[in-house]
Image (tube, grey):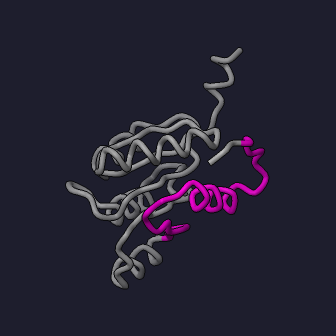
Amino acid sequence: MAEEEKAQKDTILVVEDSAPNRRILTHLIEKLGFDTVACADGKEAWEAFQKGIPNLVTVVSDIMMPNMDGIELLEAVRTSESDKKDIPFYLCTAVMDKEYILKSKQLGVDAYIVKPITFDKLKNKLKSTFPDRKWPRVAA
């Protein structure tokens, strides 16, 4: 039965080029009851997205990354033929550059998470996206 429950969990695509930040982010998301698919850059994430990620409900992506940055990934997702092209998409960044903000808003970003990412920041963003979800009781 645990296998069946695991297969039914919603999945969040985590895109972060910093390995320590990627591990922290996936850990926090998994504490909130989601499965994760973690990618080291936008290109890797785009390839995973195109192949299809079961139960994908959200993308959480860094902006500044090699190969394909978070804005380019957002644009690829939003202009794709996928039935997931309108999926909630969060951008994580320490950079609040006006150019990035304007471009990402034009492309339909759903939220920003300003680094450093904390458990509470992440949980609050996810709760606003999924207000009807049953949330696990966890200590931060």
Q: Depth check: 19 or 83 in front?
A: 19
Residue 122 colored magenta?
A: yes
Which residue is pictured at 61% across the width and 25% down the height? 7
The answer to whether 105 appears left or right of 18 in the picture is right
The answer to whether 94 appears left or right of 26 in the picture is left
**Which quadrant of the view contains residue 95?**
bottom left
> Looking at the rendering, in which quadrant would you find the N terminus?
top right
Q: Looking at the picture, how far across and down is residue 75, in whole percent?
A: 38, 64
Which residue is pictured at 38% across the width and 46% down the height? 22
Query: Hey, which residue is sitting farthest top in the picture?
Result: 1
Which residue is pictured at 69% across the width and 42% down the height? 138
**Which quadrant of the view contains residue 2?**
top right
44 over 9 or under it: above or below: below
Q: Depth check: 116 or 68 in front?
A: 116
**Which quadrant of the view contains residue 66?**
bottom left
The answer to whether 64 appears left or right of 1 in the picture is left
Q: Depth check: 61 or 46 in front?
A: 61
Q: Depth check: 30 or 44 in front?
A: 30
Q: Which residues are magenta?
A: 108-137
Query: Hey, which residue is sitting farthest bottom in the picture?
Result: 98
Which residue is pictured at 50% across the width and 61% down the height? 90
103 over 115 or under it: above or below: below
Q: Looking at the picture, how far across and down is residue 83, in whole percent?
A: 54, 49
Q: Looking at the picture, how far across and down is residue 111, in whole percent?
A: 54, 68
Q: Looking at the picture, how far across and down is residue 100, in whole percent?
A: 35, 77
Count up the numbered dots. Answer: 0
Residue 120 colored magenta?
A: yes
104 over 31 or under it: above or below: below
